[in-house]
Image (cartoon, rainbow, N blue to C red):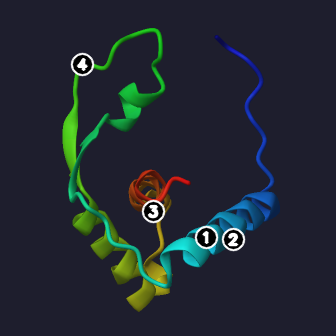
Amino acid sequence: MDSEPLQIPLDQLRHVFELALRHVEASAGSTVELEHDYFWSVPGEELYDVPNEPGTVTIGQLSESWQHLEDLLADPDRAVGHHLVWLADVLRAIGQGTAR
């Protein structure tokens, strides 16, 4: 399953994100309501080890992920790469809750 690393231009990623967000906003309005707070999560070191079934499944919490993102808005200088993981948690829930 080894292949060349996927190259994703950040300007295109930003554009795709904006298009998807506009779509959700057009159908759901300026605020989305997430039906669930807790979700199953596979730890990062096991997430991409596809040949092996994950041995650990943990519980994540959308409200906690969102709190980390709100904290970033309050203090942008504290940004870390893991903010993208918390953002992904929230985006997945929005995408699955508004899939159309």
Q: CA distance from mark 2 to mark 3?
A: 14 Å
Please report whichever mark, 2 or 3, sits nearer to the chain's N-terminal start. 2
- Quarter of the image for residue 75 reads bottom left
Read off the residue under disc 2: 18
As shown in the figure, which amino acid type bears the numbered disc 4? Gly
| Residue positioned 49% across, 74% down in the render | 28
As shown in the figure, which amino acid type bears the numbered disc 1? Leu
Labels 1 and 2 touching (C-beta < 8 A): yes
Read off the residue under disc 1: 21
As shown in the figure, which amino acid type bears the numbered disc 2? Glu
Q: CA distance from mark 3 to mark 4?
A: 24 Å
As helix, strand or loop, the secondary structure at mark 3 comes to: helix
Please report whichever mark, 4 or 2, sits nearer to the chain's N-terminal start. 2
Read off the residue under disc 4: 55
- Quarter of the image for residue 68 reads bottom left
Q: Position of residue 95 (x, y in %)?
A: 49, 55
| Residue positioned 39% across, 90% down in the render | 74
| Residue positioned 43% across, 78% down in the render | 78
As helix, strand or loop, the secondary structure at mark 4 comes to: loop
